Amino acid sequence: MNIVKLRKWFFALSALFIIPGIISLIIPGGFKLGIDFSSGSVATYSFTNNVSEKDVRTAVENIGHPEAIIQKIDEKTVLIRSKLLKEASIDAQGVRIESEKKLLEDTLITKFGDLVSTQYDATHPIIASETVRNAAIAVIIAAFGILLYVTWAFKSIPNSFRYGTAAIVALVHDLLIVVGLFSILGRFMNLEINAMFIVGLLTVLGYSVNDTIVIFDRIRENIATYPNYTLSEIANLSVAESFGRSLNTSFTLIFAILALLLFGGPTIKNFLWVLLAGVIVGTYSSMAIATNFLIAWETKKFR
């Protein structure tokens, strides 16, 4: 396959996936944020008797949280997402007011029997804002570090900075597609953005740049091996030589991710979905985006 000759089609295909995601991000409510990034409470309760979603909703509304999202996990287990539940307090007359969490649990126990298990997580606004800031800083530092490393790794050839820049362009491409995809899925499938999502993004950055470096390294070797070849011919040859290795590595990882999605716990689901999307997009971008961007820059054919 002539990768360089088809670069316009590859760029158009990428735009086809990126643009809907960007539109979804621009429209208000671009992300369905988990409690890691927006203050709130998430509680999972399992009871001895079957749970009625209608009764759970009534109990939650009675303590002042009509915005809560109720999800039945199975016949006896329910998950409740809401704004931050109020802690216990003392009113002006010195009377103790029980916490909303205790009031909710007492009501649910009355209706559905004893609690078999409980899981409760809460994030305050200050912690949520710090998490958002730290996540953004982590991604920026990772991208800058990758740029410096690739530039240094290819310092023996002219314009090594272009190799690092091309790798960053591929990473931005991958991030836009993955983030845009999660924005769309958040609107239609209630897929939340949480701390595991950021961990997944950073993992995708590492995987994608690894694939890109393999191809760039092959280009560097073939420049010395085939001095009479044009740069476009060398790029096509290098991608062809790396194609089998990249696909085998990606499919091996994809099968492992699918197995974890089927049999793994719910706490790592977001991480696995990010990783699955990132592996697919990263394999594609290493060959079709990073390589073509580098060749277009080297040959001055950005048009």
Image: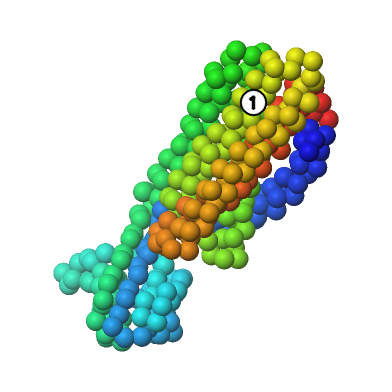
Image check: 148 left or right of 176? left
Residue 50 occupies quadrant: bottom left
Please report the residue visible at 68 percent of the width from the left and 32 percent of the height from the top: 241
Of residues 122 and 265, the one drawn nearer to the viewer in this rendering: 265
Q: Percent from the top left, x then y, of residue 168? A: 61, 31
Image check: 1 left or right of 217? right
Q: Percent from the top left, x then y, of residue 217? A: 61, 24
Number of residue marks: 1
Residue 246 occupies quadrant: top right
The colour scheme applied to this rendered structure is: rainbow
Of residues 100 and 285, the one drawn nearer to the viewer in this rendering: 285
Please report the residue visible at 37 percent of the width from the left and 48 percent of the height from the top: 126
User: What is the residue that sits farthest to the left in this orientation?
Assistant: 94
Label 1 residue SS: helix
Q: Looking at the image, can residue 209 be seen? A: yes
- Up the image or down, 58 lies above or below 41; here it is below
Image check: 99 left or right of 95? right
Q: Quadrant of the C terminus?
A: top right
Q: Percent from the top left, x then y, of residue 116? A: 26, 76
Q: Percent from the top left, x then y, of residue 7? A: 79, 37
Q: Quadrant of the N terminus?
A: top right
* Residue beneath disc 1: 218
Q: Looking at the image, can residue 7 be seen? A: no
Residue type, numbered disc 1: Arg
- Residue neighbourhood size for the residue with mark 1, other residues' Cα within 10 Å, grouped as few (<14), some (14–19), many (≥20): some
- Up the image or down, 219 lies above or below 37; here it is above
